[in-house]
Image (cartoon, grey):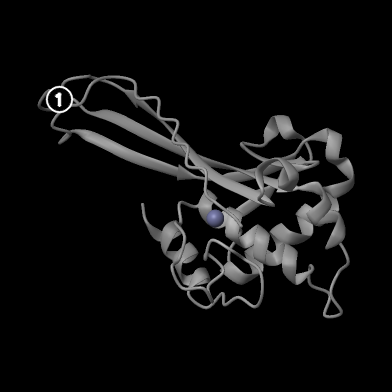
Amino acid sequence: MLFRLFVSLSVAIGLSSCGQNVKKTSIKSYILGVNPAHEAYKPMIRMLIQDYNGNVGSEVLQYSESLDSANSEVIITKGLEARDGKVGWGQWSSSTERKGTVVSVPGVKSSETTKYSLQVEFDEEFLKTNEKVAANGLPNYELRKLFAHEIGHGFQLDHDPDVKQVMYMDISGEKNFDTYWPKIQAFFSQK
Ligand SMILES: [Zn+2]
């Protein structure tokens, strides 16, 4: 059973205005890093990222060897399933910074930049149990489903009520990714 933990961290600097002079920019740059305590899982995470990007058709996820230069953490927790009854979590966050005038003044421009990031957490035993690479050279199917599901939450997708879809709340069994990849592509094409 997988549930979504929704956390939106919004730091808005300044008050709202009519907004006509506000230039809005959104930065969707996701640089994933793994906690050094889980060094052994780095190759697995890199492989999942590569596989994921290949399916989206662009580098929507990046990887950083150092957690310090990442903005999105991959947390690996021993006993997560025993603790929470789930093998993964996914959440997204954003922060908005505003520069310039607080109240809209004709002819005076202000700007607003929203940066998005994500956080995913996986059960260590689940990763270990499914670490064997598939015969076709792709990551294990169980891992591909889990990774896509939690990263999907990180890209603001909700659960899909259709039991066959990878965004269904329970990822066990055969899942369909056909509607998933276009949703991710659509998310990145939104400005
Ligand atoms: Zn979920």
Q: Which residue is mark 1?
A: 104
Element marked by disc 1: loop
Residue 174 % position (x, y): 65, 78
In this image, 133 relative to 13: left or right?
Answer: right
Looking at the image, which is closer to me, 40 or 15?
40
Q: Is 3 placed above or below 103 here?
A: below
Percent x, y for residue 48?
73, 60
* Rendered location of residue 84, percent (x, y): 66, 43
Figure quadrant of residue 15:
top left
Q: Residue at x 74, y 45 (%)?
A: 82
**From where the camera sits, is residue 93 visible?**
yes
Q: Is residue 146 above or below residue 99?
A: below
**Taking the image as drawn, is residue 64 in sight?**
no
Label 1 Cα neighbours within 10 Å, binned few <14 / some 14-19 / many ≥20: some
Name the amino acid, label 1. Ser
Q: Position of residue 96 (x, y in %)?
A: 39, 30
Task: Report the front residue among 75 and 54.
Answer: 75
Residue shown at 87% from the left, 79% from the top: 135
- Residue appearing at x 83%, y 51% in the figure: 125
Which of these two is toward me, 48 or 158? Answer: 158
Residue visible at 40% across and 29% down in the picture: 10
Quadrant that contains the N terminus: bottom right
Residue 2 placement: quadrant: bottom right
